[in-house]
Every structure is written in C-alpha cells, then in structure tokens.
Image (cartoon, rainbow, N blue to C red):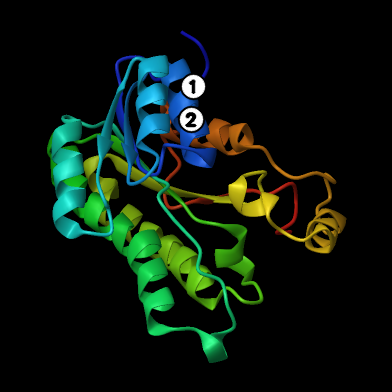
C-alpha cells in the first residue's frame, strides 16, 4: 500500500470544476478514491474532469440547504467530504452591499454547514469518516477589503473545531486546510505590486500551486492522519507564521 492511500474510499469534493478543487479531486482519485466532482458552474470542465478521473460530476448550488442535501445523497456512502466551494466579493466594509455580504457567507460558510449536516449521521452510524474544510490564511489573519471573505473563512475554522468535538467519539474526523496565496484565477488578476508584497512576506518566496493544497488534503483524508482532528493545517509557504 502506498503512503496516504485512499483505495476503497468514496469522496465528494465541492467546487471541484477548477483551481484548488480540481487539484484535490485529481489527487484523491490518484490515491485510489472514487470521487464525485461537485460543481455549481463550469459544467464542461467538471464533466471533463470526471471522465479523466473515472468519477462522476453532479451540479448543485451548495449554498442551498436542499441542493446540498441532494448532492450528499447522490454521492452515496461517503468516506470523505471535502468542502472547497467558495467565492469572493471584495470591497471596503463602508461600501459593501448587503448582497455581497450574504452571498459570500452563504456560499463559503453556510454551504459547509449544509453538507456536513447531511453527511454527519451516516458517517457516525458507520463510525468512520473524514471531513476536510478549505479555509484560507485570510480567515486566520484577515485582509484589507475582505471582511466578508475573512468572516466566512474564519467561521469555517470555528465550525470545524466544534464539529471535531461533536463527532470524535464516533470515529469521524474533521480538519481544516488553510491555503496561503495559491496560483489560481483569483490570484491571477491581482495587481503586480500586491503579488510582490505577498511574495516578500512568504518565506518560501513563491506562490503556492493547487497541487500543494491537494497533497495536504489527501494526507488528512488518509488513515495515516487517523489521530488528527480539529486541526488547522496552513499550506502557505510560511506566510502565516
């Protein structure tokens, strides 16, 4: 058996049509898991990925409790849930529209509540399971112009720590991966001076790649991490020290 093998495991990854979510789905499949690709937009990309990894793709808006529950039900007997779905609506608090606040909180944080609520009883019943929720370094340290995003990502951390306490006695683990600045469509549009400043504060001196986050998620989902729960793993090149 290879290190961090997921042979025989069934996994659901939300927000998996592109970026970090796609890399996570690819890595879990590489480890031997049967992966469902959850997506809201990017149907062509999600379907192509599902064919590539011999999984399946299912469309759902996980900010809706009904659709999140449907997605989990369609995923079947899950061993692994990875909540990666998220978006940004950046802006200064003084000028932030109510809708930008609600959309980010519902998509990034409420979706985690909805999917975890749907999956926790089946996992507790079989007394095993691993939940990994994707937060952000912004949820740990905050960031200018991202009060809504920071609140949602910080909320994921508190939620997951509480969940780990609730589910631990039934053999179900819950952890957080908090990426730093990773090369995705979101970071590609940043001004050059912002990227330079980030790199200057990152001891490893580079942006992360989606595969860096995916490897951390794979480890936390595996039996090698069987005594790890309620943890927050920063995948940030040292930025959060």
Q: CA distance from mark 2 to mark 1?
A: 7 Å
Comes first in the chain, label 2 or label 1 = 1
Comparing 9 with 144, the one in front is: 144
Is the C-beta separation of discs 2 and 1 under 8 Å? yes
Secondary structure state at the residue bearing disc 1: loop
Q: Quadrant of residue 59?
A: top left
Snapshot quadrant of residue 143: bottom right
Q: Is residue 4 above or below residue 81?
A: above
Q: Residue furthest front?
A: 44
Determine the secondary structure under disc 2: helix
Q: Which residue is mark 1?
A: 4
Front-most of residues 7 and 189: 189
Task: Please give left or right for residue 230 compared with residue 58 in the image.
Answer: right
Instruction: Determine crowd level at label 2: few under 14, some 14-19, many 20+ residues with C-alpha closer than 10 A.
Output: many
Query: x, y percentage for residue 221?
Result: 42, 33
Residue 77, position as x, y percentages in the image: 17, 29
Above or below residue 117? Residue 58 is: above
**Residue for badge 2:** 218
Q: Quadrant of residue 46?
A: top left
Residue 227: image x %, image y %? 43, 38
Instruction: Determine crowd level at label 1: few under 14, some 14-19, many 20+ residues with C-alpha closer than 10 A.
Output: some
């Amino acid at each position: 058996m290879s290190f961090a093998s997921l042979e025989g495991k069934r996994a659901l990854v939300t927000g998996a049509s592109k970026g970090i979510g796609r890399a996570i789905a690819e890595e879990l499949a590489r480890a031997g898991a049967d992966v469902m690709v959850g997506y809201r937009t990017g149907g062509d990309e999600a379907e192509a990925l599902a064919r590539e990894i011999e999984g399946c793709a299912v469309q759902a808006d996980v900010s809706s409790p009904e659709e999140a529950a449907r997605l989990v039900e369609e995923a079947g007997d899950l061993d692994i849930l990875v909540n990666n779905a998220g978006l940004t609506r950046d802006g200064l608090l003084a000028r932030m529209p109510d809708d930008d606040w609600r959309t980010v909180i519902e998509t990034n944080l409420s979706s985690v509540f909805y999917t975890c609520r749907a999956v926790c009883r089946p996992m507790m019943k079989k007394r095993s399971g691993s939940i990994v929720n994707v937060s952000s370094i912004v949820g740990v340290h905050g960031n200018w112009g991202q009060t809504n995003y920071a609140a949602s990502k910080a909320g994921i951390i508190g939620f997951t720590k509480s969940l780990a306490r609730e589910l631990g006695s039934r053999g179900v683990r819950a952890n957080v991966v908090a990426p730093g600045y990773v090369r995705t469509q979101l970071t590609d549009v940043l001004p050059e001076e912002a990227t330079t400043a980030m790199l200057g504060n990152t001891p490893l001196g580079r942006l992360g790649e989606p595969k860096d986050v995916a490897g951390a998620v794979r480890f936390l989902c595996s039996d090698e991490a069987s005594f790890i729960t309620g943890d927050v793993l920063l995948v940030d090149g040292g930025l959060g020290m």
